[in-house]
Image (cartoon, grey):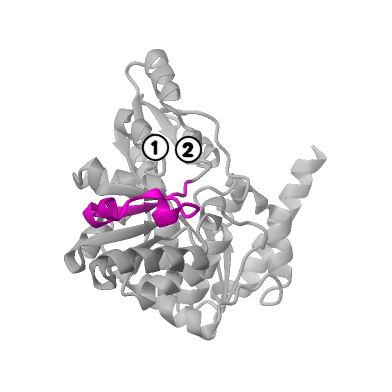
Amino acid sequence: MQHDTDDKEIAEQILAIKEALGEDLLILTHHYQRKEIVDLGDYRGDSFGLSQKAAADKAARFIVFCGVHFMAESAEILSRPHQTVQIPDLEAGCWMADMADIYIVEKAWGEVASICGEESVMPIVYMNSDAVLKAFCGRHGGAVCTSSNAPAAFRWGFSGREKILFFPDQHLGRNTGNQMAIPAEEMIVWNPHKPLGGNTQESIKKAKVILWDGYCLVHTRFRVEHVLRMRERFPEAKIVVHPECTQEVVGLADAVGSTSFIVKYVANAPPNTTIIVGTEVNLIDRLAMENPDKNVFNLHHSLCPNMFKINLKNLLWTLENIGQVNVITVPEETKADARMALDRMLALAPL
């Protein structure tokens, strides 16, 4: 009981600071945040939607991003000179983002370019990546994408060049390629720890999509047996999953899409529908609460521990030290190149 009282008091203190700062403060909360954090935000959304909000807001002096580090970095890249971006916990990282760093990506780029020619390859980096990788794409004519607009980013990429180098999430890349009817033999996986990524020169020349060997630990926890078990338990249910899941899981689902897509899918389903959701559990718990006329269950329990690092205490601490602590800074040169890639993303229409 003491814990609930503490939380209530902290939430009240946060609301008081929000009221005092008014439009000087913008709190952005990702869909995977705990309910008590989402309830205190000005906007909730996926990384694409929150990027749009960060880019569009001119009034706020302080942007507090309740999400993971790469999202706050993107908000800082898109921010205006008078704005300061903060994150309540600097340790809220992303395992997938850590699976590609600039040195191994540049090495891979050099190897692919030496075989196919740099002008034939379009680099597209998933939002779940460090600023230096977004900057790399900006410098080489490429773009950032999110799970909301990956198909639009692929279409854009192919309109300019023959091949796409997609990193760091192989599953989003493969599912997007499958959606676009790219043959399996024209999509190869690049393992950065092997010569030529574990491929032959011939297979690299033939490939339309080169997929980095990275993945999301939250979404690769979902397996085919989880889908089959739920189909058996709830034969009438609809199953919707995130495109960071494996192609085998996606192939068995009724629908696939970004976190925003999943939110709309559940909201628009008829009353009494049973919906099984394959994504982060904090979002699923909230969807079940917000849609009491439907039966919403998780495909399998999968929590993102990095998203969970943001809590009421560190959010309050950030607001009490507004503009002073956990400030996200991106070097100007990196910011300029990354901004090009992010602007290209924002210009793409999501699905």
* The N terminus, quarter of image: top right
Q: Is residue 205 magenta?
A: yes
Query: From this viewpoint, which residue is outermost toward the top?
Result: 232
**Near-viewer residue (124 or 240):** 124
Amino acid tagged 1: Thr
Amino acid tagged 2: Thr
Q: Which residue in the protein does label 2 denote?
A: 220
* Residue 237 found in image quarter: top left
Asked if 24 appears above or below 281 in the picture, the reply is below
Q: Residues within 10 Å of mark 1 (few under 14, many from 20)?
A: many
Image coordinates for residue 101, horizontal then vertical, percent: 52, 63
Q: Which residue in the protein does label 1 denote?
A: 246
Asked if 286 appears above or below 188 in the picture, the reply is above
* Residue 349 found in image quarter: bottom left
Residue depicted at 49% across the width and 49% down the height: 31
**Near-viewer residue (254 or 120):** 120
Residue 88 seen in this snapshot: yes
Range of residues picked out in magenta? 190-215
Residue depicted at 62% across the width and 50% down the height: 306
Q: Is residue 58 magenta?
A: no
